[in-house]
């Protein structure tokens, strides 16, 4: 995309009232902008208005973003998040021993399917170091125990911040992040959980699903919060299983779900398609 055609993506939310769509569209039109895409949603229970806009400004992009944010705040009393279409955010991958989600995200980034760069890989195991080296990624081994958790998490936060990451992706990182880590890292964290939340939260969900005799299994990508597996859900998918399937069968089917669900969640985040409100998300297509 040529620089003069760079667009602005805006995510808005706030108390609903008449004329919001007209006011925003009129402001862009009056400044000579060209709206490429507009979508909105109203939460009828809460009376909250959500909107995603993308437009090509007539003038300077940075100036337009600043003035738009001011207009939304002062004129409409709403919150706005703005993204340049040319932005290519850096992401940090946190991994343990499982490689399927890790390699899937890496390959999607390298192919250009995900418009982001991997700034570092942080792991509590050495298993994925060689694969990271093949991909040319900066790998940090940070072994962790209950006794060293606080110290190691501080080091992980330092590594991630120095890498310039704007998003952390837990690609089957099998550790629970503390509230201090989540507060100190100063960026969103997306986790992939290998069950259809809220069912089978916590450890060994495939084994729990097998023992319960379920007929579907799932995978859930969500923003990590202090409450284990309770953060706002971004993406989910399911697959059917039967009494003939073993735990290993469930895990094999689940890995396919985990790959696609995590990739969708990362894509929607970096493309500015997600608005969070309370403990829910609005996903704009």
Image (cartoon, rainbow, N blue to C red):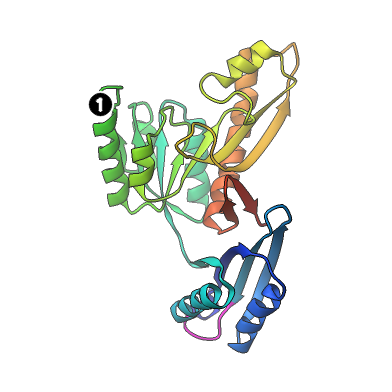
> Residue 227, position in %: x, y?
48, 34
Q: Main secondary structure of the magenta part?
A: loop
Q: Is residue 257 visible?
A: yes
Task: Tell me the quarter of the image containing the C terminus.
Answer: bottom right
> Residue 212, position in %: x, y?
68, 13
Task: Tell me the quarter of the image containing the N terminus.
Answer: bottom right
Question: Residue at left 53%, top 39%?
Answer: 104
Between 189 and 243, the one lying in front of the other is 189
Question: Residue at left 52%, top 51%?
Answer: 111
**Is residue 45 within the magenta segment?**
no
Residue 104 vs 65, above or below: the answer is above
Whether residue 47 sits left or right of residue 191 in the image: it is right
Between 246 and 282, the one lying in front of the other is 282
The boundaries of the magenta stretch are 56-60
Between 210 and 282, the one lying in front of the other is 282
**Is residue 58 within the magenta segment?**
yes
Question: Residue at left 30%, top 26%?
Answer: 144
The crowding category of the residue bearing disc 1, from other C-alpha atoms within 10 Å (few below 14, some 14 to 19, many at least 20), is few
The quadrant holding residue 255 is: top right
Whether residue 12 sits left or right of residue 89 in the image: it is right
The quadrant holding residue 26 is: bottom right
**Location of mark 1 (residue):** 148
> Residue 112, position in %: x, y?
52, 54
Whether residue 14 sits left or right of residue 3 in the image: it is right
The quadrant holding residue 15 is: bottom right
């Amino acid at each position: 995309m040529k620089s003069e055609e760079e667009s602005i993506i805006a995510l808005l939310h706030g108390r609903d009232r008449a004329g919001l769509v007209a006011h925003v569209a009129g402001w862009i039109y009056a400044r000579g902008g060209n709206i490429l895409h507009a979508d909105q949603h109203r939460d009828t229970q809460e009376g909250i208005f959500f909107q995603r806009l993308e437009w090509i400004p007539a003038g300077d992009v940075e100036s337009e973003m600043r003035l738009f944010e001011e207009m939304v705040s002062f004129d409409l009393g709403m919150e706005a998040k703005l993204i340049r279409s040319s932005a290519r955010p850096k992401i940090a991958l946190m991994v343990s021993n499982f490689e399927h989600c890790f390699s899937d995200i890496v390959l999607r980034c390298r192919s250009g399917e995900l418009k982001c760069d991997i700034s570092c890989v942080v792991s509590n195991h050495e298993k994925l170091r060689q694969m990271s080296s093949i991909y040319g990624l900066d790998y940090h081994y940070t072994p962790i125990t209950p006794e060293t958790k606080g110290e190691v998490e501080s080091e992980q936060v330092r590594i991630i911040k120095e890498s310039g990451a704007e998003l952390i992706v837990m690609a089957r990182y099998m550790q629970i992040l503390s509230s201090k880590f989540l507060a100190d890292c100063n960026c969103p964290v997306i986790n992939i959980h290998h069950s259809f939340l809220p069912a089978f939260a916590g450890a060994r969900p495939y084994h729990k699903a097998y023992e319960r005799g379920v007929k579907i299994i799932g995978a859930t990508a969500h923003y990590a919060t202090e409450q284990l597996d309770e953060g706002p859900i971004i993406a989910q998918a399911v697959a059917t299983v039967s009494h003939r399937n073993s735990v290993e069968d469930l895990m094999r089917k689940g890995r396919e779900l985990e790959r696609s669900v995590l990739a969708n969640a990362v894509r929607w985040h970096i493309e500015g398609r997600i608005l969070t409100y309370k403990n829910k998300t609005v996903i704009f297509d």
